[in-house]
Amino acid sequence: MKKTELAFTAVLVPLDFLLVCAAALTAYSLRFGWLASLRPVIFEMPFGDFVLYSAVGAAVFVLAFAFSGLYAVSGPRRIRLELSRIFLACSTAIMVGIVLVFFKGELFSSRFIILAVWFFALVYVSAGRIVIRLLQRLLLRFGVGTRRVVIISGDGHGGDELVKAFARFPGLGYAVVKRIAHFDQPAKKQLDELIEKDGIDEIIAAGADVNREELSHILGFAYSRQLTFKYTADLLTTRAVNTEFSDVAGLPIVEIKGTRLDGWGRIFKRIFDVIAALILIILTSPVMLITAI
């Protein structure tokens, strides 16, 4: 998992929260601004109370985004798929808001604000995702965040298709550093040399000629070296507990995650490490100061 992918994913949560809050504030300013002259306001809501409700509503939106899989750690996705998920998540979150308004009529009774929040949240979050994904793809074109892969394939067809696809679409974020026909002892030695130079991030097994036993050996090798392992043929039936399915240039790809400290697990661990380190520094600073004196 590349650090740039983790960084982009971690940024999405506060960004979405702020964008939904901005959508709520836009709806509020419209209703109590120039629309008030067209249609008189029949209820009053202090701005401070509305900000509080907006923060709670934004948290509901973020939860809906999370359940929709919009915070899964991966490379750039198809924007069309991501926009469809945003539409469904925004619609789900606003329905939750409508239910709350129905059962708690004392909050406010403006249907315009509810619909306006849904519309502006959809527009703002979609625009934010488009900007983030375009920026991510732009960086990939310059080699920033590119995943360096080794393709193991001997049949020619599967490996050739992947190599051509990665070369034709640099925005996919893959760079083939080596291609190996079979996973034997010389291949292990070559891979270890590349790992020592920090030259690879993933191993992709492609083609029907990679048998089940060879896949199992490749998987064990990738686990022991903390490399991401993916394959394009549905040949592996063992040790496939934590898997993720995707497609690259129309080819089905299966990723077997070696640890649950991938993706958000790694982000949470990093946050915990930083907080724990700060607490320990504060607690031990008097001792270190006395020792220095």
Image (cartoon, grey):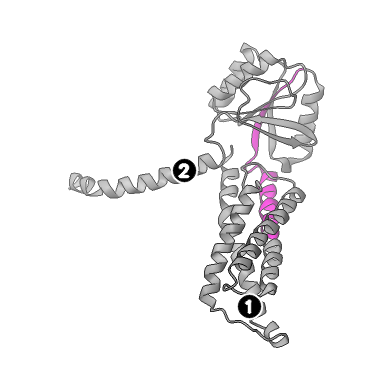
Q: Looking at the image, which residue is at 54% across and 31% down?
A: 259
Q: Which mark is residue 143?
A: none
Identify the secondary structure beneath mark 1: helix
Tell me: residue 289, above or below residue 124: above
Residue that lies at the very extreme toward the top in this rendered image:
185
Return the x and y of residue 190 as percentages of the image width and height.
61, 19
Q: Looking at the image, which residue is at 35% across and 48% down?
A: 278
Tell me: residue 135, above or below residue 252: below
Q: How far apart are marks 2 and 1 (CA)?
A: 39 Å
Residue hosting label 2: 270
Q: Horizontally, is 282 left or right of 87 in the view?
A: left
Identify the secondary structure beneath mark 2: helix
Q: If you read the primary sequence from the N terminus, does the residue marked by circle 2 or circle 1 appear first?
A: 1
Nearer the viewer's eye, disc 2 or disc 1? 1
Residue hosting label 1: 29
Return the x and y of residue 229 as percentages of the image width and height.
63, 27
Residue that lies at the very extreme toward the right in this rendered image:
157
Residue type, label 2: Arg
Where on the picture, by quarter, is residue 109?
Answer: bottom right
Return the x and y of residue 285 as percentages of the image width and height.
25, 48
Return the x and y of residue 141 as percentages of the image width and height.
70, 45
Start and end of the magenta stretch? Answer: 126-154
Check if residue 103 falls in the magenta segment.
no
Check if residue 151 falls in the magenta segment.
yes
Task: Give whichever of 228, 268 is nearer the camera.
Answer: 268
Task: Give whichever of 238, 186 is nearer the camera.
Answer: 238
Q: How crowded is mark 1: few (under 14 residues within 10 Å), some or many (20 or more)?
A: some
